[in-house]
Amino acid sequence: ILNVEQSPQSLHVQEGDSTNFTCSFPSSNFYALHWYRWETAKSPEALFVMTLNGDEKKKGRISATLNTKEGYSYLYIKGSQPEDSATYLCAFIYGGSQGNLIFGKGTKLSVKP
Amino acid sequence: GAGVSQTPSNKVTEKGKYVELRCDPISGHTALYWYRQSLGQGPEFLIYFQGTGAADDSGLPNDRFFAVRPEGSVSTLKIQRTERGDSAVYLCASSPGLLAGSPKNIQYFGAGTRLSVL
């Protein structure tokens, strides 16, 4: 069974705080890792697609790193804003699959003004 | 709007009834995926279409669930004899599918259909 774990389950921070979450995935048969941001009542929105060990991606104040050998990825948010409040999902794709995503349960971030 | 559209956004039904959930993918996207998110869980894969054919239906939980995509565009997820355990948010995603199932293809999601079975 392929398992993707995310921690923490939820996080409450103050505006301006920097924060990070972890995604753990199987280190064997790795193909790709996706990060999504899902706001309540909206569509999940892709943040990053990561495929190479050591990959680092950045989009504004959000960045992510990837370690395929040990099976983890970190998502960082610098200077959190209330509009960053959402559930952050990571999803793993294994080699030989049809590209279907295996999701973790997500990290729910709440940023207080 | 050029995004993925799912209808209805909410569906309340009674146990034992039949429901259909519709997904309009982004025009030109050949790959289409259905996922289901139950309370407290991450989204779980149900079925993948490449064009008109179901290339992988290994995630469908049982034979009460069926999906079609007759013209390679709109897809319908059909659930027969609904049970309370089917209550979930059903998500649809499409991607360009330039290479079938390419992991580099971002999947574009709809806002989901929230199904409640009473």
Image (cartoon, coloured by chain):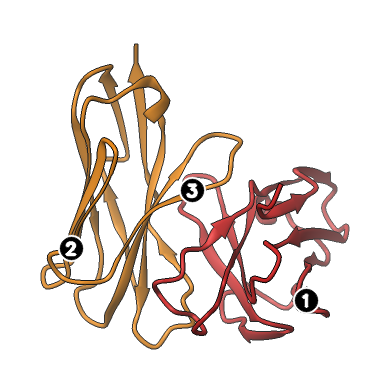
Chain colours: A orange, B red
Classed neighbour count for the residue bearing mark 3: other residues with Cα under 10 Å, few (<14), some (14–19), many (≥20): some
Residue A66 image-quadrant placement? bottom left
Element under disc 1? loop
Looking at the image, is mark 3 or mark 2 earlier in the sequence?
Answer: 3
Q: Position of residue B45 (x, y in %)?
A: 54, 68
Q: Which chain carries label 1?
A: B
Residue visible at 76% across and 72% down?
Answer: B73
| Relative height, residue B31 to residue A35 (above, below) | below
Residue type at tag 1: Arg
Provide the secondary structure element on which disc 3 rests: strand
Amino acid type, residue under disc 2 in the picture: Asp
Q: Which mark is residue B69?
A: 1
The secondary structure type at the circle numbered 2 is: loop
Instruction: Please state the chain letter of the residue tagged with numbered disc 2 in the rendered image.
Output: A
> Marks 2 and 1, Cα distance to the nearest angstrom?
36 Å
Point out which mark residue A45 bears.
3
Residue closest to the far top: A113
